[in-house]
Structure formats: C-alpha cells, structure tokens
Amino acid sequence: MKNVPVRVLIHEDFASELAKVLATPHALRTIKAQSDSEIARTMSETDVFVSGEFKAAWRDPKGACPRLVQSVGAGIDAIDLASLPPGCVVCNVYGHERGVAEHAFLLMLALQRKLFQLDAALRQGDWTPEHFYLPELRNRRFLVLGLGHIGSELVRWGRFLDMKVTALTRSPSAPRGEKAGAHVVGGFDELGKHLGEADFVVVAIPATAETANLIGEKEFERMKPSAFLINVGRALVVNEAALYEALRSRRIAGAGLDVWYQYPNSIAEKRFPSRFPLQELDNVIMTPHKPTAETMAYRWEKIAENVGRFARGEPLLNVVRG
C-alpha cells in the first residue's frame, strides 16, 4: 500500500479529531445518519473502519470488508466479531485508566461524604443536616473487581489513600497482586467471601459470559447495609433488577453508576439509562460515561499510529482479533 492513500471511514462527529493527528496519506470518509444498507455499501470502499461498533448488517453483501476495524475504546462488545470475515483485524485502544480511576473516586467520595445532600441542605440555610460527622476513605475496605488497566490504577489510588484493598480477577496470581499492590488478590469465585467485608465494591471488568450478572440478588444480600457499589466497567456485570431493588430498599447505602443498560441511539435522543426508575432514587449518582479530554487525545494519537502501521505493513498495536 506504499504511497496509496489509506481509505479511512469514521463517524462524522469524530472525523476532525482524527484528521488532526493523521500523518499517513489517507482519504477520510464519514458516516452519520445513513441506513445500514448504505453503510454496508461504503464498507466495500474502506480499508480502515474507526468505530466502537460494527453490525452484521454493515457487512457488504458482496463480501468486501475493511481490513482493519479499529475501536475507539478498550471495549469491543459492540463489534460483531462473527460478522467479520477472516483477514479482518480488530484492534482496541486504552489510555483511559487514569480518567476512569479519577471518576470512580469522585463517585466514592461524593457518596461517602454526602456531597449532594450537604450542598442541598446549605442552599436552604441548613448547616446541621442529619449526618454531622462524615467518614474518610482511610482504612475503608476497598474491593476491586478486575486487575486490568483500570483495576490496577484503582488499586494504586486505594493504597495511596490508605484503604485496605482486595482485588479479584479472572486470572489471579501472586506476582500480579504484588505488582498492583493489592493487599489480597483472588479469583471471581471468591466474591462471596469478600463482599461482606467491603465498604466499596468497584466493578472494573467487561461483560462476558463469565461476568454477566456476577453481582445479583444473592450478592447484594451479602453486602453491608453501609456499603456502596461503584460501576465503571460494564452495566451487565450487575443484574439490573437486583441493583434497583437493593437501592430502593436501602439494602446497600448507595451506588455510583457510570455504565448503563440502555443507551440512546443518537446523542440528541432523550432516554433513561435503565428500565427501572433509578433516576427517582436519592442514593444513586448517575453519570453518562464520558471520557476525559486527555484520554481521547491519547487515543486519537494511537489510532493514527495504527493507521500508519497498517499502511506500512507493520505490526499493529493492541490486536484483539488477528
């Protein structure tokens, strides 16, 4: 492909961001509101498709397909791998661990220190709301589910704040635990053993056949009534109905949720993020899973680097499926 522009397809909303850092000769095309069939036709003229999503309906009926599907994030659960033909490589990109860890601790502190309740009370002139003295994070038991990019960063932050950190992961080992700095490392099969001790349970794992509904009614029953759940991984790791009931009944103290069970079809669409009225509960903080500016600047640079590697026939970064 030497001296031949790489044909890159990307959503219109993100084209300018990628164009700023693409040094490789390229022909940039965009999609936005086209039908599935129109997008499928476009795929036949694409070398690299930059997107966090690929539907089976987007595959060209004649069999043509991009040679590289480059995700704009770490997750590839919206990419239908089965619909991609052999020879189509899928890559992802990271750089989000610092921003996600910051957000997780933002949610933890806001819940623990009753931030919104104190703010609302003082706006009414009330200096002495119900919770007069509030606890620190120091010495709190911190249970992290996942020991990947995000999980390892969460463990580091927890240790810095003098929390007692336990990390559970799909493939536990003493070296991984020592490297991350967790006090205790175990497998997901030990979840029930540690839930009852945790003050904060933070989900930082993808939703897979193994992890879907990992936390359900039984697990909420094991948690302390004073405990908080934070989910910055994937919503489906936590059973939706069980989560709502645990919060509604005050089985747990509260939750900070940044990942969801249903999303809008477009940025402009108004849609609640759950089938249950979580928005009516005062013990949950809801945020719409927005990456930081620094995360996206890093990702666009790495995506542009991968486009260049593709053009030069060099090994690609973060290959998920070769």
Image (spheres, rainbow, N blue to C red):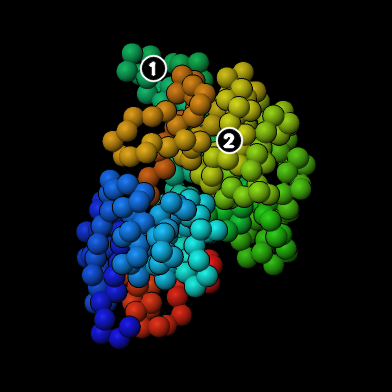
Residue 136: percent from left, percent from top = 54, 36
Q: Is residue 299 left or right of residue 237?
A: left
Q: Residue at x 72, y 63 (%)?
A: 173
Nearer the observer, 22 or 58: 58
Q: Is residue 179 left or right of residue 99?
A: right
Residue flagged by tag 1: what amino acid is it?
A: Ala
Q: Residue at x 57, y 50 (%)?
A: 206
Q: Which mark, by number, is residue 121?
A: 1
Quarter of the picture holding the N terminus: bottom left
Q: Residue at x 62, y 34 (%)?
A: 239
Residue flagged by tag 2: what amino acid is it?
A: Leu
Cα separation between marks 2 and 1? 24 Å
Residue 249: percent from left, percent from top = 62, 18
Nearer the observer, 46 or 133: 46
Residue bearing the label numbered 2? 229
Q: Residue at x 70, y 60 (%)?
A: 171
Of badges 2 and 1, nearer the viewer stands: 2
Crowd rating for badge 2 (residues with CA inside 10 Å; few <14, some 14–19, many 20+): many
Nearer the observer, 101 or 8: 8
Crowd rating for badge 1 (residues with CA inside 10 Å; few <14, some 14–19, many 20+): some
- In this rendering, does residue 11 appear at all? yes
Q: Which mark, by number, is residue 217?
A: none
Nearer the observer, 259 or 316: 316
Query: Looking at the image, how many numbered discs can be counted on the residues?
Result: 2
Point out the tag, 2 or 1, that comes first from the N-terminus: 1
Quarter location, residue 201: top right
Residue 33: percent from left, percent from top = 28, 45
Residue 196: percent from left, percent from top = 73, 35
Q: Is residue 17 left or right of residue 50?
A: left
Q: Considering only vertical position in the picture, is 20 above or below 276?
A: below
Q: Considering only vertical position in the picture, is 123 above or below 260?
A: above
